[in-house]
Amino acid sequence: MREIEFWFEFASNYSYLSVMRIEAAAAERGVTVRWKPLLLGPIFRSLGWNTSPFVLQKAKGEYVWTDMVRQCRKHGLPWQRPAEFPRASLLPARVALVGADQPWIGAYCRRIMLLNFAEDRAIDDLHTVAEVLTQLQLPAQQILDAAQSDASKLKLRQQTEAAQAKGIFGAPTFFVGDEMFWGDDRLDDALLSASA
């Protein structure tokens, strides 16, 4: 089976671009997506940063917001710069981990990303996540209970640690076998590799 590992963060603006495109692009090439939500906070802290490099480095941050306008226009995606960046995303990530192997994972991730980067809404909120799950006609309370369990909390920590062990330093990151591709601009290269 041809597949790609997709490591992403709901607070990551470049992950937004990939989340919105990867499922359809992979299907066109006959590639299976393995959804791998993670938290960038612990990875950044291990590098000595207390927040996103886009916040720490003013010039880079200014460039990124200009670039996001261009990239969203290029891909036909809605865009609104979030008033809070990076936005807390712990609960959505835990829910994504619960649904990582479920058929609804792509639709769920796209809706959460749209809330953050197109509607400028907080996403780390029980009511908001329940609303998304309900819109998808899913058993919201059952999924939220699973996501908030001790086992799920541990699993997300372990997944983030696994990302660090693989050498992941930002998101989105794609793996095809042992080969790493970093950044939304490498999505097509990763899919090409996976479909070869």
Image: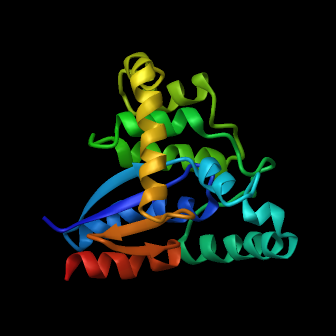
For the point 81% across and 49% down, the residue is 83
User: At which x and y percent is residue 135?
Assistant: 45, 31
User: At which x and y percent is residue 71?
Assistant: 61, 75
Label tally: 0
For the point 83% across and 72% down, the residue is 62
User: At which x and y percent is residue 37?
Assistant: 45, 48
For the point 39% across and 79% down, the residue is 188
Q: Quadrant of the N terminus?
A: bottom left
Give the image quarter of residue 194.
bottom left
In the figure, 91 relative to 23: above or below? Answer: above
Q: Quadrant of the C terminus?
A: bottom left
- Tell whether 97 sits left or right of 12: left
User: At which x and y percent is residue 158?
Assistant: 43, 41
- Tell whether 155 sits left or right of 38: left
* Nearer to the camera, 158 or 145: 158
For the point 55% across and 32% down, the residue is 91
Give the image quarter of residue 137.
top left
In the figure, 54 relative to 149: above or below? Answer: below
